[in-house]
Structure formats: C-alpha cells, structure tokens
Image (cartoon, rainbow, N blue to C red):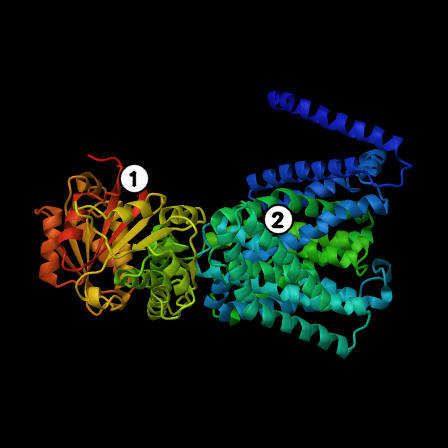
Amino acid sequence: MTIRWARLQPTIRAVIILLATVTAAGAEGHGASKPSEFILLVQIALLIAVGRGLGELMQRIGQPSVIGELLGGLLLGPSLFGWLWPSAHDVIFPPSGEQKALIDGIAQFGILLLLLLTGMDTDLKLVRKVGRAAMTISAAGIAVPFASGFALGEFLPQSLLPHPEARVIAALFLGTALSISSVKIVAVVVREMNFMRHNVGQIIVASAIIDDAIGWIIIAVIFSLASRGTLDVLSVAQALFGTLAFLAVSFTIGRRLVFRLIRWANDNLVSSAAVITVILLLMSAMAMITHLIGVHTVLGAFIAGVLVGESPILTRQIDERLRGLISSLFMPVFFGLAGLSADLTVLKDPSVLGLTAALILIASIGKFAGAFAGGALGGLTRQESYALASGMNARGSTEVIIATIGLSMGVLSQTMFSMIVTMAILTTMAMPPMLRSALARLPLGKEEKERLEREEYEERGFVANLERLLLAVDESSNAKFAAHLAGLVAGGRGLPITVLHVGANAKLQEKNRADEASPEAAVIDAAKESAKASADPEGGGNLDVISRAREETAAGAIAEEAKKGFDLLVVGIGAVAGPDGGFDRRIDQLTSGFDGPLAIAAAKGVHASEPTANARKILVPVSGSNVSRRGAEVAIALARLASEPLQVVYVSTTRDKGARRSNPSMSLAPEEAILKDIAATAARYDINVVTRLRANTAPEVAILQEIAASGADLVVIGVDRIQGDSLNFGSVATAVLGKSKASVLLVSDGDVRPGT
C-alpha cells in the first residue's frame, strides 16, 4: 500500500500544480470576453484522463467503461470538485456561454458519433432471426415503463419543470428515458459472458436493438413536437410522416448508395483514412436531412450507422480505427460533460432524494415487469424471462443522451437531468451482476448446443470469414469457369467481387467495357448467375460485382488492388500450366504481388466447353494438414449445387503424419477420424459425403486414381505455397494439374512454406 501511494504522489502533485497554474492563469484573464483555447484543452485533457482512467477501473471490476466516464464528469463537476474547490472549478469550467459553447460543440458532434457507433452495432440479421419474440418483448418492455414514466411526469411538482405549461412534452421525455435500454451496454455484458450466440442472449440483444431503434424514432417525434411548442394532430402526423419517409428511402435507395460510396472510396481513394472520411460525411449528411425534415439529428446518425454497419466491405481495420477515435476522444468528453451538468448536491433536499428513489424504482420495476411479461408472451421460460428482464434494465448511454437532448431543448430542468443521470448510472451498475447470475443458471438444450458448436466451427473457418474476393481473368473460357466458382463461394453470403481484367490487349479491354456481349461482361454474368443459384435462404445471392480498369501492368494492378483488403484472389486465365510442368509465366507474374490466399482454376473436361456448368461430382483430397481442411471447406461450399455426393478421399503425406495424430477423436484411427470430421462438417450444410481411404499410395497417384474411379468432374485441393522464385504448390499439385482429366481448383493460404 505504501509503495502504491508513493507511486501515486508524483501524479497527484502534477495534477495539483496543473490546477493551480490554470487557476492562476484564469484569474489573470478572468475579465477577458473571448473564450480561451487553453482552457478548452485543459477541459478536454481532464475529461479524457479522468473519464478513461475511471472507465478502465470500472472494466476491471466488471462494469461498463461508460460508467467511469459519467463518474469522471460527476467528480469534476459541482457534485465534488466544484464543491471542494469552487474557485478552481469556475476557472476550468467557467459558466460563460462563449467558453461553454466550445466544448459543447465537441460534445454535440460526439452525440452523433455515438449514435453512429450504436447503429453500426445494430445487427438487423439478428433482429430478423428472433424478430417475433424480440418484438413482443420490446413492445411490452417499452410500453409499461413508458406509461409509468409519463404518469410520473404528469404528477411532478412544477418546481422541477422549466416550463410547466409544456408538462406533456417533459412527461414524454421522462417516459422515453425510463423505457429504452442501452443496446451498447447490454451487448457488451452479453458478449463478455460469451452468451451472444445463445438463444436467450440473441433475444436480449435483439430486443435492446429494437428498443434503441424505437427510442430514437420516439425522440425524433418528441423533438418535432417540442420545437413547435404544440401537441396538435398535424404536427404529430408531419413528424411521423417525415420519419417514415426518411426510413423508407434510407433502407432502399440509401442502402445501395451507402454501399457504393464506401466501396468507391475504398477502391479509388489513396489516402489511408478515405473510408472513415466518407462515413463521417454520410453521417453528417443524414443528420442534416433529419434536421431539415423536422426531427432530431440523432435519428439520421443512427440510421447512417445501421447502413454503414451492413456494408459488405467495412474491413475490421477501418471499423477499429473509427471506434478507437470515438471511444478515446468523443465518449469521455460527451459523458464527462453529462456528468458535469449533473449536480448531485440537489439530492440533499429530502423531497428531491425521494423523487429520485421513486424514479429509479419505477424505472426498474416497470422495465423488469414489462420485459418479463414480454418474454412470457414470446414463449420463453421463467428462467429465460428473468435473465431477459435483468439484461433489459440497463439504461446507460442511451438515457444520458436522451436527457442531454431534453436539457439542451429546455424541456428538462437541471434537477430532473441530475435525477435521470443518477437513475441511468445505478440501473446500469446493477445490470451486469444480475444478468451474469441469471445467465449462469440457464440450462443449455441439445439443439442449442449443436448450433453453438456449428457456429463455433464456422467462426474459425476459412470460407465463413471471407469478406471480399478479387477475380483476375482474361478473355478465355477458363475465366468464365473461375467466375462461376467464385460466384458459388460468394453467393451464399453475398460477398462482393471485384473483377480485374488482365487480358493482353488493352485497347480491346476498353472497347469491351462498353460492350454488353464482351468477354468481361460474360465473366460478370457468370459470377452473378452462380451466386443467385447458390444463395442462402437467410441472405446472400444479391452479388455486387464490379469491374476495375487497369492502367498499369497486370501484376502491378493486382498488387495495387491487394492493398484494399481482399481475402482471396481467384485466377482464371487461358494458360494455366507452363511448358516445364509448373505454372504459366503469366500466373507467376499475376500472383507475385498478392500475399494472401490464392485459388487457381483450370477448366478441363466438361468445363472446357461449358465453363458455367455445375459440377456433377466434386472430389476433395484431405489429410491432417490445415491446408487440406481449407480445400475441404471450399469444396463443401461448391458442392451445394452438385447433383451427387461430395467425394472425400484421405491421402497421406510425410508432412501430415504428426499433424493428424492431434485429432481429438479417441475411438477411431487418425485417418478415419479426419474423414469423419470432414463428413460432419459437410452434414452441417446438408451435403452428403462419400469417403475413401488411400493411405498407402503416393498422394498424387491416389488422387489421380480416385478421379478416374469416381468419375469426378472437379477436384479441389488445398495446397501449400512453397517459397521460391516462381509460384509453386509442390509436386502433388503439379502432377494433378498436369494429368487430371477433371477440372482442378488449387486453394492455398497466405503463408509461404520453405521448400524441402
């Protein structure tokens, strides 16, 4: 303890010196009319340091970081710092409108960014998946506390209302603040407990998402009413019509526009933050649109976040950088200012303290009872309904934003604002331990266990984690074959494909781009048709395929495209094999600048004349290596349209002998365990499998014999990329590529293995 205190003493002395310096500097310029940039920097530095520091502490004890940021503002505000050292507080956080406007501007922009982030966390697929139960729960969970909050607002003393004549608007704000759960807080706790994929976890998060969406629509309408100052039918209809029209346009035309703008920025702009810039511009534009139609800007920012979060090419790096900016700067500033605006010293008044306790009690009981009843109506068990009600009681950031809007509009008084912030903090801090306790006691059903195991497998899989495909093709029939295969892989999940034409004749390329019957157009059509055929019922098939012009060499073009976040390069050109038995020189050149996973397609047999024909029978060799499993995953993705069962043959290699012994199956021989594992994986996607063992034959011989014996028309092989001056997948791949009568797809990961 003594050592820790000794370490803290220099920091405490530094803070005291800083505050004393600022106080002295502020005292000298106290009469100045202009706002001080120095004071602004001190405010931001203190809010970030204290807020993020307490946020770290909160996370270490199992609480959301936003609680620390709110507490940081409370400590720096009149509740503590202003009470202990009023003169220093007035200097650092002066009440003058000019100085306050500077940091308020940052905080107001921070609200929009927080709503953007909330929208990006909104998973509409999850809502659709458990929509019926979630809608019932959300409706009941909103209606009960909203009615309770509205009733409380109607009976509040006039002294708590800044405008008693607008009591109805204040009551609507209070009802909304009591009824909406914070999706961010709920999702964080459910994710931390590893319950996000559980049935009840998905329903909790989906219900919170619906709560948030309904909440911002309600706030938009209430804002419109408060702006007009009346509660007439015409203003209500105008606000509702404007909101519904905005939502309709956003989720139709707007969705496509957002996707295309993000993709255009990622593919054409060279600056490192181009996509983030476009996202911020989209958020600002949609916020301004909602302002112009008479509803609050938060709705535009929230919907912008939903559309951005659904973008198929929002890479993890871009997402993390944007979240980092918001979490490190705007969140501590906004929530810190919210804490600064709350004055907990008002709770010294017994009547205010009693009303605050009543507010917390009504908020908690109303939300818990409503969500519990909604869970029962939605078909959940009592244990599941209890867990659900426990999770939905967290108010957190959402209520603080709503209260801040009400305070800025003059609808809520300073005292009411402090009461709502207190309620938000206490309900949020109570939620994590209650939810953890409730979830820990929930039994896991057989079907749910099987689904969780399947999803856990998919999370580690290769195909399931693909986000974007790059297709390099020329004018050959093999290009159509490669496009057909790429479309089958991408179609199940709606992955976007970028087609890069690498034909030799550049002038012909430019002509072809405007010709609907061009080879390039045929390649794009092949990919789209295959995607539609393999579309997943729950989404996919609506494939976004674009063609990219190249101004440099083909290899240079691929190297340039590789910087834009592609997960797999599929190559389909006329000449695959070279005269020396390896790959053609052009394939060497094309793949030299791409360090990620590769897929090389070679159309043979039926595909030489009909490149877009579905494979009747697919063969995939497997062993104990990771690359063979990768090949099996791709083969399973392609086998959805095959007319006959997938043929899986085990072949042994010297390299795989040690790897295959690590299989967890105990009762089977290693070879049989591997085959059983692949068959179980295929069964998850309703694909029939026929397995064979060829463990005592050279792998290339075993594969060629199996092709001939089974009559397969496509063989998919997972291969290692061997280090060297030219592209080399090893002797097995070379032999199969040169001698196979069936079409071949070679799939490698991004790693390069030293040659032997």
Q: Is there any visible trace of residue 344 in the rendered image?
A: no
- Residue denoted by label 1: 752
Residue at 31 percent across and 61 percent down: it is: 475
Residue at 11 percent across and 57 percent down: it is: 706
Q: Is residue 689 left or right of residue 696?
A: right
- Residue denoted by label 2: 429
- What amino acid is found at the position of numbered circle 2 in the picture? Met
- What amino acid is found at the position of numbered circle 1 in the picture? Val
Is residue 218 or residue 514 the one in the foreground? Answer: 514
Label 1 to label 2, Cα distance in Å? 49 Å
- Count the numbered circles shown: 2
Please tell me which of labels 1 and 2 falls first in the chain: 2
Residue 377 in the image: state x and y as whole percent: 52, 72
The crowd level at tag 2 (other Cα within 10 Å; few <14, some 14-19, many 20+) is: some
The crowd level at tag 1 (other Cα within 10 Å; few <14, some 14-19, many 20+) is: some
Q: Is residue 277 left or right of residue 18?
A: left
Q: Is residue 127 left or right of residue 73?
A: left
Helix, strand or loop at label 2? It is: helix
Helix, strand or loop at label 1? It is: strand
Which-is-in-front pick, marks 1 and 2?
Answer: 1
Residue 153 in the image: state x and y as whole percent: 77, 65
Question: Which image quadrant: the C terminus?
Answer: top left
Which residue reaches farthest right? 31
Residue 339 — which label?
none
